[in-house]
Image: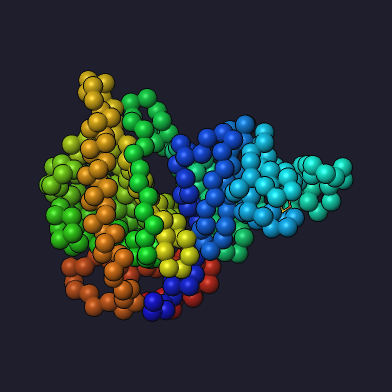
């Protein structure tokens, strides 16, 4: 892979890691993001904790352990850690070393909202700098279906995915749905695209969409088409070569429609397919730092400038191409 500014750095921000339905109380999930190993567990208090995956004792992976009350128990010697990574019990020792009691295991900032679990990542270890907004429609409010979601592990980087926000011409070619009108606005960590998409072959006529990035990895979409929907796209780097791309959809549930779940299933299938049309391009393209653009291409450099703010070592504004 050719090196460019973004290729060996991870951005800071909130990243989606799981849908809430994927982690029941007492359950543990392991994942690798940002080249690091994490474990997530939900205690009997229903709170989700995300900790570093390797035990500070002798390094076992806690993902193979068990959830006990509001703690995770290591599968190797049974040390237990609470939701802040503090050791609360060692089955064969009355004394817990002070260092272990204070929290030898690193915990991470988590927000569970909109029926999703978000992890804050900052390569420098900083505190969260903004919040992903809570949405009543996405949070399981009456009148909306559950999330229909799909996750792909793909060989690309976040820099490719965010560029979709300004790439108007590809809609007609890749998705057979030309964009009639589009505006993109930026406000600190927020980038918002408001668009009117012409007839889409499967999703309906005249789609009005508002697509908003809250930081570099989480995008919310409000779409009015044949059905009103809420969508989420999140992409979370696994390492510098690949990422998990997750796409979720909810439909407004009109009680007059008896089989809304079947419709949602079908609609989600169409949307997933439309989304996958981009994936095939992303997996096989190269990144052009200095692309050859024409006048009618979107405002790519504004978007790249916005994206650079999430990288701690971005050069001063004046030097940004
Ligand atoms: S390695 Fe985890 S308790 Fe020993
Ligand atoms: Fe696309």
Image coloring type: rainbow
Q: Quadrant of the N terminus?
A: bottom left
Horizontal arrangement in the rendering, residue 19 relative to residue 107 (left or right) = left
Query: Residue 152: where, in percent of width, then height?
Result: 36, 54
Viewer can see residue 301? yes
Q: What's the residue at 43%, 34% (across, down)?
A: 139
Query: Residue 319: where, in percent of width, then height?
Result: 43, 78
Going by the picture, which residue comes out furthest to the front?
A: 76
Q: Is residue 259 above or below residue 52?
A: above
Q: Quadrant of the C terminus?
A: bottom left
Horizontal arrangement in the rendering, residue 215 relative to residue 250 (left or right) = right
Q: Nearer the viewer, residue 94 or 259?
A: 94
Q: What's the residue at 22%, 23% (across, down)?
A: 257
Q: Is residue 31 above or below residue 157?
A: above
Viewer can see residue 166? no
Q: What's the residue at 42%, 79% (across, down)?
A: 3
Q: Nearer the viewer, residue 20 or 295?
A: 20
Residue 122 placement: quadrant? bottom right
Query: Residue 97: where, in percent of width, then height?
Result: 84, 51
């Amino acid at each position: 892979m050719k090196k460019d500014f973004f290729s060996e750095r991870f951005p800071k921000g909130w990243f989606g890691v799981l849908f809430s339905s994927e982690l029941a109380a007492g359950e543990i999930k392991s994942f690798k993001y940002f080249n690091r190993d994490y474990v997530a567990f939900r205690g009997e208090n229903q709170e989700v904790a995300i900790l570093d995956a390797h035990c500070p004792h002798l390094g076992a992976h806690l993902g193979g352990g068990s959830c006990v009350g509001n703690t995770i128990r290591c599968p190797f010697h049974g040390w237990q850690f609470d939701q802040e990574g503090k050791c609360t019990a060692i089955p064969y020792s009355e004394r817990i070393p002070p260092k272990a009691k204070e929290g030898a295991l690193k915990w991470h900032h988590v927000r569970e909202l909109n029926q999703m679990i978000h992890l804050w990542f900052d390569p420098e270890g900083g505190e969260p700098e903004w919040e992903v907004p809570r949405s009543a429609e996405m949070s399981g409010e009456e009148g909306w279906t559950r999330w229909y979601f799909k996750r792909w592990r793909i060989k690309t980087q976040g820099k490719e995915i965010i560029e979709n926000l300004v790439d108007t011409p590809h809609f007609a070619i890749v998705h057979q749905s030309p964009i009639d009108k589009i505006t993109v606005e930026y406000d600190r960590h927020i980038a918002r695209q408001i668009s009117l998409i012409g007839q889409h072959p499967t999703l309906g006529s005249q789609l009005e969409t508002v697509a908003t990035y809250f930081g570099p990895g989480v995008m919310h979409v409000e779409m009015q088409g044949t059905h009103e929907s809420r969508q989420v796209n999140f992409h979370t780097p696994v390492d510098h070569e690949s990422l998990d791309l997750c796409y979720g959809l909810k439909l407004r549930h009109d009680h007059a429609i008896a089989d809304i779940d079947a419709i949602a299933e079908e609609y989600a299938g169409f949307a997933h397919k439309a989304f996958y049309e981009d994936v095939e391009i992303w997996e096989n393209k190269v990144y052009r730092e200095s692309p050859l653009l024409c006048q009618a291409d979107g405002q790519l450099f504004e978007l790249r400038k916005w994206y650079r703010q999430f990288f701690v070592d971005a050069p001063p504004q004046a030097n940004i191409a």
